[in-house]
Image (cartoon, coloured by chain):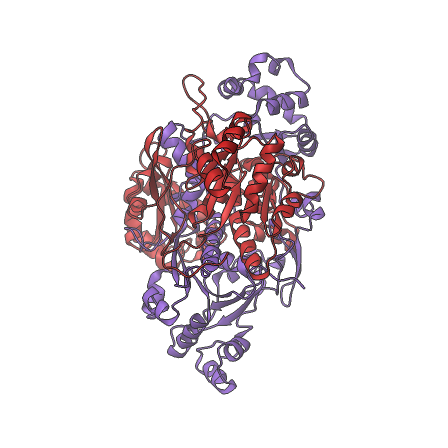
Chain colours: A purple, B red
Amino acid sequence: MTRGAFAGAKVVEYATMVSGPYCAKLFADMGADVIKVEEPPAGDPARQRGPFPGDQPHPERSGLFLYLNTSKRGVTLDLDRPSGCEAFRRLVAWADVLVDNHSPDRLDSLELGWDELRKLNPGLIYASITPHGRTGPRSQQKGGELTSFHAGGLGSLLPTRSEDTSRSPIKAGGYPTGYSTGLTAAVAVAGALYGRKANSAGRLIDVSEQEAILALVRTNVAGTIYHRTPWSRVPERPPALGRLQCSDGYVVALLIEDRHWHAFVDLMGNPEWASGPEWGSLFYRAGHLMEIGDKIGEWAAQQKKEDVHHRGAAKGFAIGSVYNAEEVMNYRQYLARDYFVDVDHPQAGRFRYAGWPYKMPASPPLVQRPAPLLGQHNKEVLEDLLGYSTDEFLGLCRTGAVWEVGGQ
Amino acid sequence: MTQLPEANLPPLHGVRVLDFTWVWAGPYATMLLAMLGAEVIRIESEGRLDIMRRIIIWPLFAPTPQVIPTNQGMAFNSINMNKLGVTIDLERAEGIDLVKRLVGVSDVVVENMRAGTMGRIGLGYEELRQVNPKIIMLGSSARGATGPESHYAGYATVHHAVGGAAEITGYPDGPPSTTFGDVDLLNATASAFAVIAALNHRDATGEGQFIDYSQCEGVTSLIGEVLLDYEMNGRSPGRQGNADELMAPHNVYRCWGVDRWVAIAVETDEEFATFARVIGQPELAADPRFADAASRKKNEVELDRIITEWTRARDRDFIANMLAREGIAAAPSRDAEDLFHDPHLRARDAFVEIDHPELGPREFVGPPWKMSDCEMEAQCAPLLGEHNDRVFRELLGIGDEELAKLRREGVVS
């Protein structure tokens, strides 16, 4: 019997899509009791997003929702009805943590702004995730996955080695803003939870998507401002310091230390054009590698990516194949480390999910349960956790304050 | 560590972290812990300096090649604030003994050397546990401490490729694109989370542990839905540029000027009607090609062409502000200079100022959150060996004579 590192922590998630749900998932998979609050009729809009088995949209079969909401219990409350809002207040009073990624206007309009929340629960840790943060001239503006990524500065660097500036900067694939922001919020919440031993007063944690992205380019900002070495998506970055196209795909290598360069040249069979002593200098390479970029490219084009990947790694320099989803799912290193986790969901079925990057033998993360069906835990949460009687619960269902699937 | 409740203590007050990290993925993890109030002590070795102390981040375009003075690398300074720094020669037995004395009075050890390196110099978890049974140690390596590729080296871009994220990043008709050091900083963030989780576990149970962190897995854990597409449909998703699966417009559009761009995302039909009005073509909202989300998505190429005709003659900030006023998500694609001068970020004190002993005032990006009762003054990253006296004397109670001997013998520099 293992104990999750956050066993006993009580978390209410009033959040949609990626940022708030990923934050709460990290705690749920570590044993926290996370109650996800969804609003009728459709619940979290992530349920409308793929992938779906057979590409058939179904609110209980969204791969995005299934992954981001493991280990949580779910309730459906209509917060716009007073009795639904009252149930939410009781949940907040029960919780150690509230994770919210709505505009602050939303809870303000329910008279549940930060001042009211802390009256309700003086020890509450309230993580408020918004596109631009809760203060400042843009605090009320709309934003999201795409715009916050570019507002935060990461888009201007992508795609790397883009030769054609008539084409736009891009967002990284997937939901990088949501995941990065959720992860950032999780560190702050974890810290605040730990800190309750020293300071039991509640805390407001204001997390801005833009700043979560900005934080990831902090080294670039510092280098640009003070060393005048701006990065952009069009640096003159030679192939050996980045992507190489092999006959069957791509590898990425990064050669900084001189011994890594020598190992790379050795891997290429020590061609004459890369073997002069001047190439042993980092500074020389930085200025001249483009001159032999074509030759390196010609060499790479005759190689198989996995061959280059593993032979290069054996020589001790940083190199890896660009893997697609299939290759990741079959990656020997991940399989050997039991990285994946099999999750059986009553409506979506059994699939293999990404696990966690940290192995913590004394408190291993675990999928405690599959993602909740819409309203799946209404009864047990309201009755067992919040102390509503069965009659009261049924009354809430009748008015729609608690929303039961198929019940209205 | 028992403490009386006291107002305004930062949450990790009283936690001591020994920091053996370098480059980006380790140092930023411990800086996050420092920003939550932990006392972080960098252990550095003159013989194997953190390359970020001296190097300019890539690409290097100084007119003549220069090695930056040891304390003046700006990337280093931006991810090592609020730490103490000591220098210990880890190639000597006396140095290892000194480290073990520090481990005896610490809570956490963080390192991001190649898996197994700490063990080889006598500082593996098993050794440290003998000194301090409750110690928490996080080893962050390229591919994890176990498995057939545990010895592989790596940097952020390589993890991004192997972890499956480069494959889905790029133009639909272009090659895969890695990002850059952001992957290191994300892995640092997840590492900080794991450390705090382990602290929580230790306080509840008395158990310490070794956390084996894989930076490639750190990338993969942030694309969970992409893997499920393969699981569900046998399909490996490709590259989408800026596109979204449901929304259109959802792109970055060329604006007036040189390489100036604005990101625009329209979510609902109501927003699209507003957008059509703002760009002076209200009839688009009723156009059957664009009347609902599915039609807009289907005719996205044509829609983007129409939008670009409007955006390319206008200033990106003007466009972003105009759309924001109408409730539509829009933002310029900002570069580092833009960020540094962004009035909104300035109003939120997103940058903190430190006083660098050699360079004077410098501004760096501050903590990625605002937390009540956790306002700490930003402190400059430690100069090499800056806190030797303070740490060895005050923490370990080493006297003048012993310290002089350690210095004479080169154990401490």
Farthest front residue? B401
Farthest bottom residue? A391
- Viewer-proximal residue, A49 or B292? A49
- Viewer-proximal residue, B319 or B93? B93
Counting the numbered discs, the total is 0
Q: Is residue B160 left or right of residue B340?
A: right
- Viewer-proximal residue, B371 or A219? B371
Residue B115 image position (x, y, % from top left): 64, 39
**Residue A92 in view here:** yes
Quarter of the image for the N terminus of chain A: give it.
bottom right
Q: Is residue B280 left or right of residue A261?
A: left
Residue B24 image position (x, y, % from top left): 50, 37
Question: Which residue is pictured at 56% across the width and 69% down the height?
Answer: A373
Q: Is residue A350 above or below residue A403?
A: above
**Residue A167 in view here:** no
Residue B405 image position (x, y, % from top left): 53, 29
Residue A337 image position (x, y, % from top left): 69, 48
Q: Is residue B4 above or below residue A328?
A: below
- Viewer-proximal residue, A69 or A283? A283
Question: Which residue is pictured at 52% across the width and 75% down the height?
Answer: A381
